[in-house]
Image (cartoon, rainbow, N blue to C red):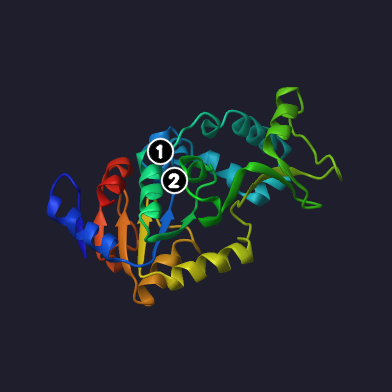
Amino acid sequence: MVSMNPADDPSQVRTAQSLVSGARRVVALTGAGVSTESGIPDFRGPDGVWTRDPDAQRLSNIHDYLADPKLRRRSWQARLNHPGWQAQPNAAHRALVTLARSGPLRAIVTQNVDGLHQRAGSDPETVIELHGTLYETECLTCNEHRGMREALDRVAAGEADPPCLVCGGILKSATISFGQALDAAVLSRARAEVEACDLLLAAGSSLSVHPAAGLVGFAAGNGARVVVCNATETPYDDVADVVLRGSLGEVLPSLV
C-alpha cells in the first residue's frame, strides 16, 4: 500500500493512474466526500453535519423517526432546506463521467442520495444508489413512492409532517436510514458489479458504514486492485494498493 497526498509525491499519482488505465472493468464506490465541494456537507468529517451537531444523527435513525413526531417535523424542515436542491456537480463527478466515456468505468456504486452523478452526465443505468434517493418519498405503511417536490410543496404550504396521500401513513425520503435494511436487489446488483471488476476505486467514503464498506474487502478478496481516495484514514486503507489523500475535486481528475 502507498499512502500519500497528491501534492507530496506526484509519482504515486502516476502509480494510481497506471492502475486505472490498465484496468478492464473499474467500479467506483463513492461517498459523501465526493459531494462536499458541491456544497453538501459530509456527516463524519471535521466539519460534518454530525460532528457539528451530534443530535442531528437522530434524524437518520428510523426508530426515532417513527416514534417522535417532533423529530419528523424537524426532518421535513431539513429536507425543505437541503443544500442538494441548489448543488451542482463538481470536478469529482465529472471525472467519473470522463472515465466512463473512455471505457473502463462500468458502474458507480454510491452511498450518496443527491443524484449529482446523474446530473453530471453519468448514465443513470450505471449508477447504483445503495442508500436510495432524496428525490422521492416513500410511505412507511403502504410503500407508495412519489416525487419529493410534491411533499416539499405541502411542507412549504404549512403541513409540518405531511402524511401519505394514499393511506395516511408516515412519509419519509426514499433513503436508507439507520435501522433500515438496504434493498436486497440493489445490494445484489452492486455486489455483482464489484465481483466482476478488476479495480475498485473507493472515493470520498469513510468506509465505516456496512454493508457498503464491505464491498472494498470483497473486491480485494476477489483479486481486484483497490485505490482509496479520501480526505481522512479509512478502515480499509490496509487492503488498498494506493491510498490518495486530499480534495476529491483534485484527486479524481488527476486519475483520468
Callout 1 crowding tier (Cα within 10 Å): few <14, some 14–19, many ≥20 = some
Residue 132 percent coordinates (x, y): 60, 51
Q: Is residue 231 visible?
A: no
Q: Is residue 233 visible?
A: yes
In screen coordinates, is 77 left or right of 53?
right
Q: CA distance from mark 1 to mark 2?
A: 7 Å
Labels 1 and 2 touching (C-beta < 8 A): yes
Residue drawn 60% across the image and 46% down it: 133
Q: Amino acid at mark 1?
A: Thr
Callout 2 crowding tier (Cα within 10 Å): few <14, some 14–19, many ≥20 = many
Q: Amino acid at mark 2?
A: Ala
Residue drawn 77% across the image and 52% down it: 143
Instruction: Tell me if residue 216 comes above or below residue 96 in the rendering.
Output: below
In screen coordinates, is 254 left or right of 90?
left
Disc number placed over residue 32 in the picture, else none: 2
Residue 87 percent coordinates (x, y): 48, 32
Front-most of residues 14 and 181: 14
Secondary element under disc 1, as helix, strand or loop, is helix
Residue 31 percent coordinates (x, y): 44, 50
Circle 1 residue: 36
Disc number placed over residue 143 in the picture, else none: none
Q: Quadrant location of residue 214?
A: bottom left
- Quarter of the image that includes the N terminus: bottom left
Secondary element under disc 2, as helix, strand or loop, is helix
Q: Quadrant location of residue 201?
A: bottom left
